[in-house]
Amino acid sequence: MSNKESIEGLFQNAENFINSLDYESAETCYSYILSMQPDNTEALDSLGEILIEMDERERAKKVLSKSVDIAPNEGAAKYFNLGQIHEGQQAINFISKGIQILKNQKSDIIAGKIKGDVNDISKEIASALCSLTEIYMTDNCMDEDAEKNCSLFLEEAVSLAPESPEVLQTFASYRISQCKNDDAIDLLTKSYNLWKDKGVGDLRLPSYELRLSTCKLFLELGKYQLASEILNSLLDEDDQISEVWYLLGYAYSFFDKEASMESLLKCKKVLQRENCKEPVIHQKVDDLLKHISGSEVNTESMESNEEMELENKNI
């Protein structure tokens, strides 16, 4: 087998390992490639990305910085990943560089110099503009031009990807920061309507994380029933996430006390399975249970009764 064939095989193996969430084995594949081709930026960029997934941020910075040194004007993804693991102005600089690379690619596609999909590039640029907006709403919110920059980034993002749930949701978050809640509700509802009927496996369905963020924004805006719809769909995918059960219990507390208590009790069970030892988290759940019932709640007794009811249903 030639060196080229060996490297191609390692890239394929790494991709398979990533698809099965085996990042350590993928890391081994990329390390083998780099032992043969130390300046292979594709391997460096991919290794940097999985190191971020493994929470190896310092190693990721070194790997991605080496790729930048080798090919500073190629590969937008490495700049977006560097932006993810830096803060403030450093993050802004990295993301802005990535956006410029994508804009150059888009121009080359339009001019017929390279092949590619202009719409896909536009969506990537829009997503990166959302990332910049988030930084100016958080780390750099005190900058003199923060609000102006947010407006400019979001206007451009909407012009590039008007039907992007991420863009509309980021715009909604920005409107909340401006205390324009009615506008925020309209934008968030429009975002939700784009994907609410999409099933798992549909490429138009946003990531789990984005949908969870949608719920939190709906809760902040007082749209508890909409939030509960999404939370229930998230539980259909994975019912072992305590945060989702807690948020569902909170949402239900405004219009269905019984369902709220059931959700919070399930939250406590999942916390036990997660071996959560943070007393603050457990107290937060207990406080909400107490608020709903109007008195101290004997959760052990309630959990026992719930289990007996389930057993009776199964008889």
Image (cartoon, helix red, strand yellow):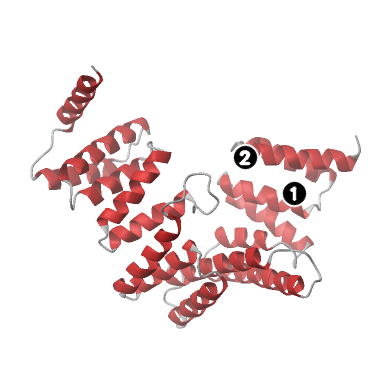
- Which type of secondary structure does the marked residue at label 2 adopt? helix
Q: Position of residue 237 (x, y in %)?
A: 43, 40
Crowding at dot 2, Cα within 10 Å, few <14 / some 14-19 / many 20+, comes out as few
Number of numbered discs overlaid on the protein picture: 2
Which image quarter holds the N terminus?
top right
Q: Quadrant of residue 142?
A: bottom left
Q: Nearer the viewer, residue 48 or 222?
A: 222
Badge 1 is on which residue? Answer: 43
Disc 1 marks a residue whose amino acid type is Ala
Q: Position of residue 195 (x, y in %)?
A: 45, 55
Q: Position of residue 162 (x, y in %)?
A: 51, 70
Q: Nearer the viewer, residue 158 or 193?
A: 193
**Which residue ends up furthest to the top in the rendered image?**
315
In percent of the image, x 25 and y 45: which residue is there?
249
Which image quarter holds the C terminus?
top left
Label number found at residue 19:
2
Along the polypeptide, which appears first: circle 1 or circle 2?
A: 2
**Which residue ends up furthest to the front in the rendered image?**
197
Evaluate if marks 1 and 2 touch, with contact meaning CB atoms under 8 Å apart.
no
Q: Is residue 167 left or right of residue 263?
A: right
Q: Is residue 39 left or right of residue 17?
A: right
Crowding at dot 1, Cα within 10 Å, few <14 / some 14-19 / many 20+, comes out as many
Disc 2 marks a residue whose amino acid type is Asn
- Which type of secondary structure does the marked residue at label 1 adopt? helix
In percent of the image, x 52 and y 76: which residue is there?
153
